[in-house]
Amino acid sequence: MRKTILSVKKTVDLINHLCCNLELLHAKYSYTGVVGIERGGIHISKWIAKHLGIRHQSVRISCYDENDKLRENPIVSINDKFDPPFVLVDDIVDIGNTLQAFIEFTKFTQGIDKDFIMAALHWVKESKIKPDLCAGIKESDHWIIYPWERPIEFNDVIDLYY
């Protein structure tokens, strides 16, 4: 399997791409907040919330067990109720299980029937669900390593400023 290690600069460029698109849609949808899916989406969602000047929340969705095996029923946990419309953010929509679990959970527990926009840095075409916005398309035989999944190197930080 091919691997791509994304630099901090490239990741920031992708996040800014999402921010610009979400800013254009914000006038139409008037989002009340941004919800980040822990772990990968949390870094992106904080940036987007700050950019849009709106509330930030998080949701934890565990699709894998302690042995890294896919769970039949993902575990979803939240701290607060989400006020629609909002933006749901993750780093990647790969299989689609995380997004599907969120949709089912919010519909059952909060009566929210897809009153949110899903944004992701990357999307795999073979996924069960397509996000409303994505900054890039990932091939299914390709693995992306984001900056929060590895130690940050000094050169990554320098690249941001020079």
Image (cartoon, helix red, strand yellow):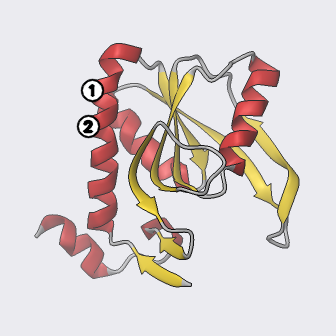
Q: Residue at x 56, y 76 (%)?
A: 141
Using the rendered view, name the quadrant where residue 155 is placed: bottom left
What's under tag 2, amino acid-wise?
Cys
Say above or below: 109 vs 152.
above
Q: Position of residue 126 (x, y in %)?
A: 60, 57
Question: Which residue is rendered at x = 62% and y = 44% of the image?
Answer: 129
Given contact means CB atoms under 8 Å apart, are the residues at marks 2 and 1 in contact?
A: yes
Determine whether 160 is above or below 1 in the image. above
Q: Residue at x 48, y 81 (%)?
A: 3
**Element carrying mark 1:** helix
Residue 24's disc is 1
In the picture as drawn, the residue positioned furthest to the front comes out as 126
Q: Which residue is mark 2?
A: 20
Residue type at tag 1: Leu
Badge 1: residue crowd in 10 Å (few <14, some 14–19, many ≥20): few
Q: Is residue 57 left or right of residue 32?
A: right
